Amino acid sequence: MATIRAFKALRPVPEKAGEVASVPYDVVTTDEAKKLAASNPLSFLHVTRPEIDFPEDIDPYDKRVYMKARENLQKLINDGVFLQEEKPSLYLYRLCSDGHEQVGVAGCFSVEEYEKNIIRKHENTRKEKEDDRFRHILAISAHSGPVLLTYRGNEQINKLVTSEIAKTPIYDFKAPDGVQHTLWRVEDARAIIKAFRKIPALYIADGHHRAAGAWRVKEEMLKRYPLAGDEEFKYFLGVVFPSDQLKILPYNRYVSDLKGMSTSDFLRSLEERFEIIGLGVLNDGFEPREKGHFGMYLDGSWYTLKSKKINSTQADDPISNLDLTLFQREILEPLLGIIDQKADRRIDFAGGPSSSIKLMRRVDADGGVAFTFYPVTVDELMAVSDACMIMPPKSTWFSPKLRSGLLIHKF
């Protein structure tokens, strides 16, 4: 059964929360992070992306970068930007954007339950990114960015959350991207903690590298302190939302060339496998509105592709029924010669709002072809996790995003 643990949060003083809160470290490049934080010395990007405070030629994995993260966090503390809670608490975190609302419980989650698959995964981690989070967490002795988790909804937890958000929040601000972030401190968390003990499993929605880094930190700390008890380093920071509140946007694809084929040859090859409907010029981009359909942008025109093959559902293999699996099997491998999406430099990814427009502009500028998809559902994600299987690379883009720097878990 799932464990959620109250903790003594390090958090911004209320009047500074909006200035401190930053986008997650992994949704921006170094240049983008530098621009976002350039006029804001309080931005938490100075902690999560500290390479922005070095000359451009710095290696972001340089030891000095991680020490700078520690220095920048300590400066925020010394300058009175952060306060330290005196007693452990849970928090509620609400995100509101474009009519969508979701409320999650923020707390700490057990690394041991991550090891035992009570906290389930759907994504492989990359060593260099896992190494980065491991070094960053160790350097600042804290988990600075929450893992996004989900669970199958529970009416008891819903009622407890609804009761708490009727109270006065500790933070309530609108971020530059228009998302409203509201947080409440739960002074008596016992009822919520008890209710989560009835939840059989939690699922990582976003933040696999942060969770893997926390696991490696625990292993390292146990080497240093082999007689440790129930220390804070055995838990990581997360926010857990009921699955029916999460919103997933597609992760779309760009391929730089047609493997030597002309446009007409490529379309003829596709016609053997798909029904093709020409949509013409669509300045606002295009993403399909139902499962089993792909969008394609090629030579200035949009198309809809529908597979001619009828796939029977295989309950024991939830991967085979994903649209991205069909895309890999019917287009990427046989027609474009891309076997490994992670390693092949001919393919790139864009997720989130307006991603189809971004890819359309890229095709117009550089050639190639773009593909757009119907979003993976949370039920599909959980089915893959329950089967201990791995989703295709870059399958999900959760929106809206949690902000970093509002809650920090020190150990």
Image (cartoon, helix red, strand yellow):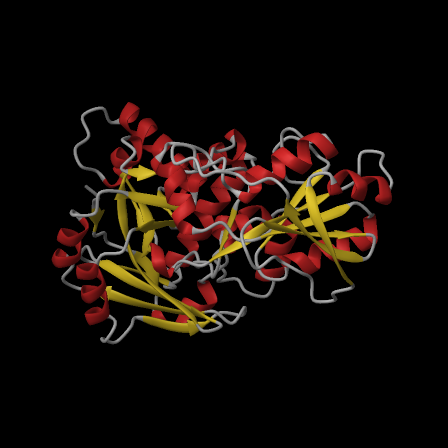
Q: Quadrant of the N terminus?
A: top left
- Is 223 rendered above or below residue 24? above
Label count reads: 0
Relative image position of residue 340 (x, y in whole percent):
62, 29
Residue located 52% across and 62% down the image: 41
Q: Is 237 left or right of 349, judged from the image as shown?
A: left
367 and 185: which one is in front?
Answer: 367
Residue 356 showing in the rendered view: yes
Q: In which quarter of the image is residue 258?
A: top right
Residue in front for this viewpoint, 114 or 237? 114
Image quadrant where one finds the C terminus: top left
**Is residue 18 toward the left or the right of residue 273 in the image?**
left
Q: In this view, does 313 lie to the left or right of 237?
A: right
Residue 57 lies left or right of residue 149; in this view the side is right
Residue at (39% x, 64% y) in the render: 81
Tell me, yes or no, if residue 144 can be seen here. no
Query: What residue lies at 58% left-to-right and 39% top-to-bottom?
Result: 326
**186 in relation to 364, above or below:** below
Residue 114 image position (x, y, % from top left): 30, 36
- Residue 90, horizontal then vertical, whole percent: 23, 57
The image quadrant of residue 102 is bottom left
Name the residue: 43% across, 35% down. 314
Task: Residue 136: give x, y in percent of width and height.
Answer: 45, 40
